[in-house]
Amino acid sequence: MLRLLIIAACSLLSAPFANRAMAADRSELPLSADVIIYGGTSGGVVAAVQATRLGKTAIILEPGKHLGGMTAGGLSWTDVGNAPDRIKAIGGLTREVYQRIGAAYGMKPGTEFDPPKSHDITRTGVDFAKPPSLSFEPKMAERIFNELVAEAGVTVHFNSALAAVGKSGPRIVSLTTTDGRQFRGRIFIDATYEGDLLAAAGVSSTLGREANSQYGETVNGIQSPARKPAAGKFEVPIDPFRIAGNSASGSLSYLLQRGELGQIGAADRRIQSYNYRLCLTDRPDNRLPIEPPANYDAADYELLARWIAAREKAGERLTLRSFLKYDPLQNGKYDFNNRWPISTDFLGGADDYPEADASERVEIARRHENYLRGFFHFLATDKRSPPRVREETSRFGLCRDEFVDNAGWPHQLYVREARRMVGDFVMTEHHCTGQEVAPDSIGLGTYGIDMHGARRIVHDGQPVNEGSNSVSVPQPYPIAYRAIVPKQRECDNLLATFALSASHVAFGSIRMEPVFMTLSQSAATAASLAIDADRAVQDVAYPQLRERLLADGQVLE
């Protein structure tokens, strides 16, 4: 029996409304609309704005207190692909979002995506130098999303977590929130990272990794140990046992999980790892310390200490970028993210998150925060961290002017993957690599297949990270309309734009914020057409949908 989930993302610990238009007494706000969007993520906002531009009414139900999801939650170094020319694949409202951000930083119309002219290497990112429109402050993104919904007249209900779904046959009739309010609509859009609405509506979904054999893929299921250092390969031997040299003592805890590697290519329910995308600054006037967790124990980071010692013994000169990546944002800020075998990802910590209840999700988020606070504290203070690493790490701190209601810590856990819908059509590795072309395009995927490690275990006497192997994506590729619609017998008025129908491998490429926004605009357009024709979303005529998408600037091939 399907378990109905109540959402409580870590965003529950967040701020007063940034947008005065949203601060009205909730009893005065409407409880019905043509289109109900669950999730005030980047895509949720885009879907709502698009619906109103097409003459429909729209309501966003957001479990937390902020709009923008990860785009406003710390993922500021925008994932558009491995080369600047892939920016051309971004169109429609998504492009408008980034243009508005660029304009807010003083970029003139038509120049928002021009590469920055600075030759300062400290302001160059790992992949390629990005303009302010694609390397912004989180607070700027949230401001733009708030402006968009205000201009469009979209109603937003914050603190509105889902409790139940009312259906008549395959049709959703209403959503009930945990405070007992009931929202009615004609078409519903699930714009959550977790796929909570589709699950509560009885729509088929899956978790974890399919077997390679299920879709004829090559990098699904259990993987061999990471092959590249940046993706998690330990290039130096490290003793992983509690008592060095004594395997009978058992492996070190916390940074290592128990278990065998297993059969390569076999299915499991493990989830690629999560983290927080920290926005840090090295400007003293805007810097807050990254305090360690209350239960900090340096012994938890023993594997990290041994990895440091082994690398130094091998002659490696370590810096902070030997443990993570950080990319330049505006006004002296940086976007910090995972890179290398032990970094900002809390490997193994996400497996229970997708189907966890509200309180369990809060606890999982807390464990991720504690891990990351401890990781930075170790690098900044522990004598086993090289002096130059301690000095460099200590330069950075949380930003006083970001996430101000949460002491500078992001309000959004980076949920890289959770549920994925299983529709009549499933995007797979073959569509991403160009071996097959998905029909009825509603937008393009542009990013490489990026699957973060699922676990760190001892294999053949050495620590290994498992789950991050991938294949390349040679060029942007179409994403099918049928990948965002459920099986019609399960639900005929729901679209899912984040937890879409894709294999674990394909999702590893699709799961980028620009793509989520693109798919959400297309979903809102399909919703409008379905309402006008009084049809199920599965019966929307693609030629008509395509015509409207192109008219609105979407890039489909």
Image (spheres, rainbow, N blue to C red):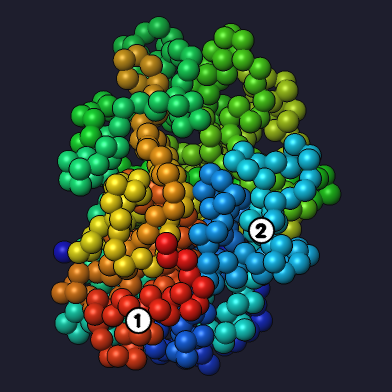
Depicted 201 relative to depicted 333: above or below: below
51 lies left or right of 137: left
Residue lying at 66% horizontally and 53% vertically, measured from the top left: 135
Q: Mark 1 highlights which residue?
A: 544
As drawn, the label of residue 81 is: none
- Which of disc 1 and disc 2 is earlier in sequence? 2
Q: Are marks 2 and 1 in contact (CB under 8 Å)?
A: no
Depicted 474 relative to depicted 331: above or below: above
Hey, what amino acid is under mark 2?
Answer: Phe
- Depth check, front residue: 557 or 317: 557
* Figure quadrant of residue 542: bottom left
- Depth check, front residue: 267 or 111: 111
Residue lying at 41% horizontally and 40% vertically, measured from the top left: 472
Hey, what amino acid is under mark 1?
Answer: Gln
Q: Is residue 206 visible?
A: yes
- Depth check, front residue: 215 or 495: 215
Percent across and percent down for residue 504 are 31, 48
Q: Mark 2 highlights which residue?
A: 113
Percent across and percent down for residue 98 are 62, 64
191 lies left or right of 310: left
Q: Is residue 357 visible?
A: no
Depicted 214 relative to depicted 142: above or below: above
476 lies left or right of 405: left
